[in-house]
């Protein structure tokens, strides 16, 4: 959370695929087709998208925003196949469709161009998700469809990556103009002080671990001595 000028600033960062901003995009096939933490993986990645775009990060931010609103991951599912080299994953897509509904071609024009589209059509029936929608899911968590929070979330979690809003558009969303207003310090006005964080170097961490181990050893010795004394006392009487 930071201290001093950085206090109260929450930053989201993942350096796994960091690169120079002006460097040309590389096909994921040249790197690793399975990217992004599982529950936050955009549908185009699960359908075999060849490039990592900004829209993929926007989807992940939408997942985090939904989690902040509901206190639970929005697209959580089983992860036994998380290390597979195949980007297509039935269970994760099923979880997304159970929340969002099955994608309509009118809402995602390029879905037929996705490498795994044929597998998608073979594995899923659109009719199974007729009653599923983001508005119904969020309404169960007391987030109303007419709220500014839902409006922003809906724009972040559009199935079609070409229609998802940009980070600049998200920052201009009306959600950020209603109370509580954004501040430089997320703890501003909070009656409960955020505990001071302790920053340790590797050496400090090793010293702290050694000290903790010695304390545990001393406690065990004291307990053993006390047990021996108790045994002697019981024997006498």
Image (tube, rainbow, N blue to C red):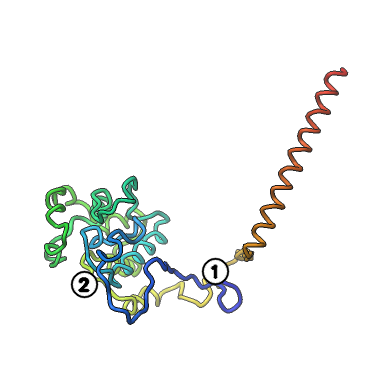
Residue at 47% across / 71% down in the picture? 11
Q: Residues within 10 Å of mark 2 (few under 14, many from 20)?
A: few
Residue at 30% across / 55% down in the picture? 137
Specify the farthest residue to the bottom: 22
Viewer-proximal residue among 13 and 109: 13
Q: Residues within 10 Å of mark 1 (few under 14, many from 20)?
A: some
Viewer-proximal residue among 75 and 44: 44
Question: Which residue in the structure is indicated by mark 1?
Answer: 1
**Relative height, residue 219 to residue 171 (above, below):** above
Rendered location of residue 88, percent (x, y): 23, 54
Q: Secondary structure at mark 2?
A: loop
Q: Secondary structure at mark 1?
A: loop
Rendered location of residue 57, percent (x, y): 33, 68
In what quadrant of the picture does the N terminus appear? bottom right
Side (left or right) of 139 relative to 225: left
Viewer-proximal residue among 33 and 193: 33
Question: Which residue in the structure is indicated by mark 2?
Answer: 162
Residue at 16% across / 49% down in the picture? 124
Rendered location of residue 165, percent (x, y): 28, 74
């Amino acid at each position: 959370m930071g201290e001093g000028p950085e206090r109260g600033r929450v930053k989201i960062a993942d350096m796994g695929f960091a690169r120079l901003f002006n460097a040309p995009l590389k096909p994921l096939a040249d790197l690793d087709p399975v990217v992004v933490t599982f529950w936050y993986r955009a549908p185009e990645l699960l359908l075999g998208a060849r490039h990592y775009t900004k829209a993929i990060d926007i989807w992940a931010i939408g997942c985090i925003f939904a989690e902040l609103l509901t206190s639970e991951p929005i697209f959580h599912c089983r992860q036994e196949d998380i290390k597979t080299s195949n980007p297509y994953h039935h269970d994760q897509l099923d979880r997304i469709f159970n929340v969002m509904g099955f994608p309509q071609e009118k809402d995602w024009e390029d879905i037929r161009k996705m490498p795994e589209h044929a597998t998608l059509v073979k594995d899923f029936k659109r009719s199974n998700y007729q009653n599923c929608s983001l508005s119904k899911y969020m309404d169960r968590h007391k987030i109303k469809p007419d709220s500014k929070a839902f409006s922003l979330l809906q724009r972040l979690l559009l199935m079609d990556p070409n229609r998802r809003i940009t980070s600049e558009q998200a920052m201009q969303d009306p959600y950020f103009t209603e109370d509580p207003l954004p501040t430089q310090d997320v703890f501003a006005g909070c009656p409960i002080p955020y505990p001071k964080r302790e920053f340790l170097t590797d050496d400090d961490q090793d010293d702290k671990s050694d000290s903790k181990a010695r304390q545990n050893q001393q406690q065990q010795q004291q307990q053993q001595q006390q047990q021996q004394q108790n045994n002697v006392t019981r024997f006498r009487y």
